[in-house]
Image (cartoon, rainbow, N blue to C red):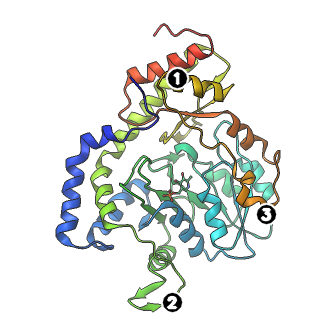
């Protein structure tokens, strides 16, 4: 039996009828653009996020719209991490501003607050930390080193918190993705901007409809980036399951970490959960010696795994003009060489987790007895 890195079919089998009922309701209403379904989802998800929610077309646009709402543009610098998905830096470039990278802490994979504070310049208009793999960046510490606005890339962190602060509710704005593989996933592209500031909420609401408040009157230059009503219907159907899915992810992570620690091997380091953090384990990501060998071994055993991310952003060909070189961000580069995300989705069984860990043990020449 194979164990996929990710499997949506098991979830669809469980919740398919709920989703279909919501989709049929949208069809019956014929309100396909914005309208009540989008409003209902925005209202329902606000509890999870702890801030006003504005549904947009995808997580990449959420980042772009958040930066636009702050008026960021040419001549500005935005401080961010090189160890993330491309959209984080891409959104900065879309505004005409310059992404400036600062290294991560290897154990959390998130921006290192001490390094970030030294990278702030008079041109730094915003910080864009990422809550990678479902673990919130240390926003209180980042805020100590920077007076300006923080935009949270919470694409992977719906439901996460740190010291009681919810992802998406701490910075000036938060950005979420509901890409199908995310912890709360649509059946296509979908995203959301969150904010506790009514003026910013108003700007994002206008920016997502070409900068218009009154139909055909445009007082801002915006884009077309609305949350699709069909996707809002899917998300509304799934939202009631989110907390139990998150708990299951956390239980799976705990099991992986216990089993891996029990092996007592130095070659594999399980993910860190800092004190005060509620990690939602979008990914369960280990650091492993001979990572590529381990990945090939798991594949032979029918076990899927994924490398997020094999090339840090400062080394991406399209960003060469920024002038970074190999060696500039050693922790991010080390992470890219060693990370491996193991199978993680709420429907994964304990037996499957045990099999994954047994295969890891076998690769490094240890026995689990499983
Ligand atoms: C960290 C991060 N930022 C931004 C995005 C962009 O989201 P989307 O794919 O919905 O545009 C993603 C997801 O793909 C992500 O993982």
**Structural distance between the alpha carbons of marks 2 and 3:** 34 Å
Residue at 41 percent across and 37 percent down: it is 345
Write down the residue under mark 2: 219
Sequence-wise, the earlier of marks 2 and 3 is 2
Q: Which residue is mark 1?
A: 300
Which numbered disc flags the more N-terminal residue, 2 or 1? Answer: 2
Element type at mark 1: helix
Residue 269, located in which quarter of the rendered image?
Answer: top right
Does the Cβ of the disc 3 residue fall within 8 Å of ligand 1? no
Asked if residue 101 is positioned above or below residue 261 in the image, the reply reads below
Residue 163 x, y percent position in the rendering: 54, 45
- On the question of residue 135 being in view, the answer is no
- For disc 3, the marked residue is 321
**CB under 8 Å between callouts 2 and 1?**
no
Q: Give x and y (percent) for residue 36.
A: 26, 70
Mark 1 → mark 3, Cα distance in angstroms: 40 Å
Question: What residue sits 57% from the left and 15% below the top?
Answer: 361
Q: Secondary structure at mark 2?
A: loop
| N-terminal label among 1 and 3 | 1
Nearer-the-camera pick, 141 or 367: 367
User: In the image, is residue 57 above or below residue 346?
Assistant: below
Rounded to the nearest whole Å, what is the CA distance between mark 2 and mark 1? 58 Å
The reply to whether the C-beta atoms of the residues labelled 1 and 3 are less than 8 Å apart is no
Where 214 falls versus 325 (above or below)? below
Image quarter (top left, top right, bottom left or bottom right) of the C terminus: top left
Depth check, mark 2 against mark 3: the one in front is: 3
Label 3: state its secondary structure.
helix
Left or right relative to 299: residue 230? left
- Please tell me how crowded label 3 is: few (under 14), some (14-19), or many (20+) other residues with Cα within 10 Å: few
């Amino acid at each position: 039996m194979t164990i996929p890195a990710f499997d949506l079919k098991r979830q669809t089998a469980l919740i398919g009828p709920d989703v279909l009922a919501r989709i049929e309701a949208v069809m019956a209403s014929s309100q396909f653009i914005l309208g009540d379904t989008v409003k209902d989802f925005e209202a329902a998800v606000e509890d999870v996020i702890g801030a006003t929610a504005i549904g947009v077309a995808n997580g990449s646009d959420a980042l772009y719209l958040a930066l636009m709402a702050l008026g960021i543009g040419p001549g500005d610098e935005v401080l961010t991490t090189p160890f993330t998905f491309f959209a984080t830096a891409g959104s900065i470039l879309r505004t005409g501003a310059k992404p400036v990278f600062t290294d991560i802490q290897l154990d959390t994979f998130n921006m290192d607050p001490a390094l970030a504070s030294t990278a702030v310049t008079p041109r730094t208009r915003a910080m864009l930390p990422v809550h990678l793999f479902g673990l919130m960046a240390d926003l209180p510490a980042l805020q100590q080193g920077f007076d300006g606005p923080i935009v949270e890339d919470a694409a992977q962190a719906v439901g996460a918190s740190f010291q009681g602060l919810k992802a998406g509710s701490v910075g000036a704005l938060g950005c979420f993705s509901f890409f199908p593989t995310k912890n709360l996933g649509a059946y296509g592209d979908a995203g959301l901007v969150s904010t506790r500031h009514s003026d910013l909420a108003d700007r994002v609401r206008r920016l997502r409809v070409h900068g218009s408040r009154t139909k055909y009157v445009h007082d801002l230059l915006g884009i077309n980036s609305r949350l699709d009503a069909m996707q809002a219907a899917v998300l509304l159907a799934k939202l009631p399951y989110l907390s139990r899915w998150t708990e299951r992810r956390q239980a799976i992570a705990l099991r992986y970490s216990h089993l891996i620690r029990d092996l007592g091997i130095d070659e594999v380091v399980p993910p860190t959960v800092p004190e005060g953090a509620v990690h939602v384990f979008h990914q369960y990501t280990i650091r492993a010696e001979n990572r590529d060998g381990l990945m090939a071994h798991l594949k032979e055993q029918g076990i899927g795994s994924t490398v997020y991310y094999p090339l840090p952003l400062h080394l991406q060909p399209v960003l060469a003009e920024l002038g970074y070189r190999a060696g500039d961000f050693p922790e991010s580069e080390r992470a890219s060489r060693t990370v491996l995300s193991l199978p993680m989705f709420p429907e994964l069984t304990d037996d499957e987790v045990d099999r994954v860990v047994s295969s890891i043990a076998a690769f490094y020449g240890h026995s689990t007895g499983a």
